[in-house]
Image (cartoon, coloured by chain):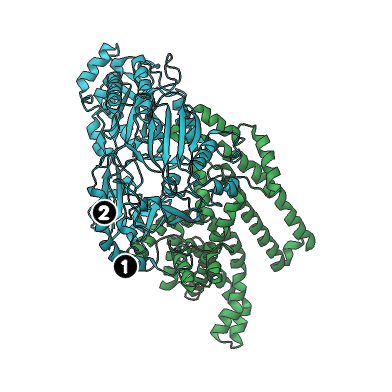
Chain colours: A green, B cyan
Amino acid sequence: MATYIIRRILIVIPTLLAVSILSFTFVRLIPGDPATVMLGERASPADVEKFKEQMGLNQPIYVQYIRYIEQVLQGNLGTSIITRVPVMDQLAYRLPATIEAIFFALLIGIFVGVVTGIIAALNRNTIIDTMANLVALTGVSIPIFWLALIMIYFFAVNLKIVPPGGRIAAEITVDRITGFYLIDTLLMGRLDYFVSAIRHMILPAVVLSTTVMPQIMRLTRTSMLEVLRADYIRTARAKGLRQGSVIFKHTLRNALLPVITVIGLQIGSLLGGAILTENAFSWAGMGSWFYGAISARDYPVLQTAIMFNAIIFVVMTMLVDISYAFIDPRIRYK
Amino acid sequence: MFSKKTVVTRRTFLTLAGVSAAAGLAAACAPAAQRPAAEPTTAPAEPQAPAAPVAEQTLIIGRGGDSVGLDPAIVTDGESARVCTAIYDTLVVLEGASTKPVPWLAESWTTEDSKVWDFKLRAGVKFHDGEPLTAQAVKWNFDRWQNPDHPYRYPSQKYEYWDKEMSGVVQSTEVVDDLTFRITLKEPSVLILPKLALFNFGIASPKAVEAQGESYATQAGTPVGTGRFKFESWTPNDKITAVRNDDWWGSTVTLPYTQMPRITRIIWRSIPDNNTRLAEFQAGTLDTADIAQTDLATLENDPNYVFTVTPSVSVGYIAFNHATPPFDKLEVRKAWAHAVNWDALIETFYSKYAKRATCFQPPSILGHNPNIKPYEYNPELAKQLLTQAGLSDGFETDFWYVPVIRGYFPDSKALSEAMAADLAKVGIRLNLKTEDWGAYLSDRKEGKFPVWALGWGSDNGDPDNFIGYHFIWSDPTKPNVEDGYNNSRLQELLRKGRVVSDIAEREKIYQEAEQIVHDDVARIPIAWPASVAVDRSYLKGRKEWVFRDQYENFYIEK
């Protein structure tokens, strides 16, 4: 078991190294360079040269790469070419915002997905099942930025029941303690601020949850159906257990195992969804940060973005693999 | 004043604000407006009407991006500029409705020969950190901008606007006495005044810059100026907040072109997505917002919004490389100008606030030549001109269009396609091309395009920054690298425009320059897009100013 886990962890290192080399090269292969993008209409070729030299963009790419890795190992992710603020500082601002959004999106996604999945499975091949499947399919196919806009117009502009964007009312300045508004507002002792933060959280979290909800729902349904056919469920029913007990104690617990592993992998798609969702809700998190960095060719930020996503993916896959080893003993002996 | 802990919702503010603003306002506006627009004078400390307590009024502005930094000397982008102008004061500002330089931190100035300029500073002005504004403090700022070895400059900082606008102009600066600051120029020039009005030359508190070092006025620092608003907080990529500076010098001085602001707090919110910004504006969470030209129509007939159209200070044009055949022939350039139905293009591809450009500079820029008539739409004449140039069968060329949305080219691709259709009728066949914006800008600078689309927006309203920027190049004896154009008379005129101080004479110089650009068809100006500001209708006071921010004009009345 321990060998399996260690081996699995060690494999992460070459994977990340490969990702870093590829992303470093590809980012710099995008046509257009930050110097001209940043200096704009007014730049003379001499200005552009000077800028490139200052930013070290003139050196051979492998030299730039080695310098970059050296810095990263010292915990320095470089400085944004555009804002001249250390990437690490920006990360400290952005990461909590995204974690908050993803956390709530995941909560909503899991809750709604699992519940509708169960309902669909229990009502297999009825109109309820078809409806749930239809909604899930629609959820998968709707572009998230479009859904965001529709939700903003309906709930914020027309009904005015939730705010259209931002993390908290514009008049409120939250003290920077943890970076998590929901925690910091409470630490400040301001319930009204907390409520404002919650209200701002609703739309983005709901929209973002649609990236994971359909998969969770469909998987819960399939998995439930499979377990419901199992012998031990028949036994449970045969010994006279109540329906609730059969469903929640015996079926759901077993059915949820594959769902849980999939949720781990879904964090990756949540990060992808966050780019568009955060942009649509002017949510100052990782997603909107990366989005801006792409158009500005802000290499250090872009590089961090790719590495960040890669790390999340690799680590999540690793955790899922390891969890398999716990769940299914056959794996660890291979 | 407005601490982070205060519990006031925006609604409460506005209700409070509405009542007292209505009362306080009429009084506040009247004296300023009725004052004759003669040379501004400084009155002795005579408190203005709104010195009486005004209710809290918060102005929430929705914009497309965050500021890069708030140290005006090292930032160049518009989103940084619009916050810097509220926090810092420059020695001189442009009047607002016109480009006339008027006193600001300097209450007056004198010069004998346009070479040595003495600026008399206002007495009793304080920075937001309580430090006094003195000639020494001003000199400290100039030294930091000018001297690469200044102890408070850092390698990561570029002083782009100083290097571009001032380094070739300013010889030295000195402190004459505590309130007199002298600038000596390399050559006599009147351009120093509009240049000093650039937001980049806002005066910062030396003490604050020294204390904060490299992080001064970055997201991690605190900008300190003498301006109308004091910096309060910055949540990166979300918002910047500033509160009114109740000790602003403007509260003790009566000037026809300014007054004490009535807005007590400004929040600049970054909302990158155009649709989201529009939605926020419609949901009522923004008082004013930058709205994409294409979205203006959605708000147009709604009484909740007020549109203010400001005179154009930009131009979209077609540029030729005069060194690349067949554009070396005047007839060919002229044929191009005659072959296209520009009016139809402008109607289709610009907002209704844009106007057909009759010459290079719009009417608000000095030297605009009202006597120039644009080349009329006449395909027959265009064909004749091509025949005269020996190209009776027409010709084929690459044409480069702008890859991004610009006010001066809201939809460059579609416009280019329509233009290509018109040109095809006279035998000019276009291969439409574009590339990444950054590459586009540098390639045209290096003269790689035969003919292309681009535009310009004025930085400071001066013709030297408009027609001068395009047609003065470093070596007047050789053609320009960018477009291969050379006209020695034009060079002579534009260079003269930099030193002549008499406004009427300067205007004549630039008008002649305009005529030359027109006659040579150096470039074809297409449109002057006007900028349109949209406010919620309860936000009052906006004026048709283009050359200065107007935070002191706004007030909320609900």
Residue ID for mark 1: B15
Q: Is residue B261 left or right of residue A89?
A: left
| Callout 2: chain | B
**Residue A33 shows up from this direction:** no
Residue closest to the far right: A3
Few, some or many residues within 10 Å of mark 2 (<14, 14–19, 20+): some
Q: Label 1: chain?
A: B
Q: Residue B546: where, in percent of width, then height? A: 32, 42
Q: Is residue B207 above or below residue B153?
A: below
Q: Quadrant of residue A55?
A: top right
**Frontmost residue, B15 versus B176:** B176
Secondary structure at numbered mark 2: helix
Depth check: give the residue in front, A56 or B324. Answer: A56
Which image quadrant for residue B498? top left
Q: Position of residue A249 (x, y in %)?
A: 60, 80
On screen, residue A171 above or below B193:
below
Q: Nearer the viewer, residue B551 or B520?
A: B551
How many numbered discs, if any?
Answer: 2
**As shown in the figure, which amino acid type bears the numbered disc 1?**
Thr
Residue with the mark numbered 2: B29
| Numbered circle sitting on residue B92 | none
